[in-house]
Amino acid sequence: MLLINAGFRIPFCLSLTSLFALILLTACQPLIQAQTGAQTKIPVMSPSEDKAATPAEQNQPIAPVSTALTVEDIAAAPLHTDTSSGEQPVNKTVTREPEKPNVEAPTPLETEKPYVKPTFNPADLVGRSHSYVGAQFGKADFNRTEGVIHVLQYRQADCVIDLFIKIVGTAGARSPGDAKILSWAMRERTIKKPLNQTLCQQQFYERKL
């Protein structure tokens, strides 16, 4: 009798345990649906909804709902810019400066050089004749003879130029027109005044006819 009671209690306890587990799973089903439904979005069919579905709807496969964003959705979505600080978004587009036309700079005009008066060096008269000197510079301001040397003296404002001619013949004779200039000398007109040779040559040049 005891064996019969023990054999009856074991299946009975297993049935109660299975029933209790089924009730527990049924009670936890809404909680599991609330926790996992947002992530997987797997539709949970209640018994009432399952009974109301038509056979045609039951035969259709249920497509899983994907929550992942595609590349097209990311590209189409506008970028969120935080404008709470008042700063405008920086446009990083590189702007090219307009090309400047190649304009050649005008060539600067050369500055005019100051006018320099021409000069004449008395050394260029050495070997020239007496008549040539008279034709170029006119009659001498003073003539004198010292032995066989005749002196032609040209007096300028700041200097004196002497041209020496050798006289062929007796002393005191006048030099002929073809007599040659042997040498020359230049000196200041005022004693103890420095001689400016350039100024003297400029003044001598101004005497040219």
Image (cartoon, helix red, strand yellow):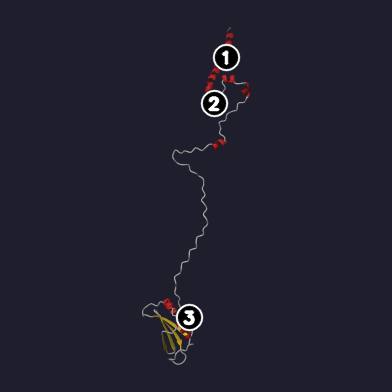
Identify residue for label 2: 37
Local secondary structure at mark 3: helix
Identify residue for label 1: 15
Mark 2: give few (<14), some (14-19) or many (20+) Cα within 10 Å. some
| Identity of the residue drawn at 54% across and 28% down | 39
Q: Quadrant of residue 148?
A: bottom left
Distance from disc 2 to disc 3, alpha carbons, whole Å, reads 124 Å
Distance from disc 3 to disc 1, alpha carbons, whole Å, reads 152 Å
Q: What residue type is labelled 3?
A: Asp
Q: Quick check: 83 left or right of 10? A: left
Identify residue for label 3: 124
Distance from disc 2 to disc 1, alpha carbons, whole Å, reads 31 Å
Q: Earlier in the sequence, mark 2 or mark 3?
A: 2
Q: Position of residue 19 (x, y in %)?
A: 56, 16
| Label ID, residue 35 | none
Q: Position of residue 83 (x, y in %)?
A: 46, 39
Nearer the camera: disc 3 or disc 1: 3
| Identity of the residue drawn at 54% across and 19% down | 26
Local secondary structure at mark 2: helix
Q: Which amino acid does label 2 sit on?
A: Gly
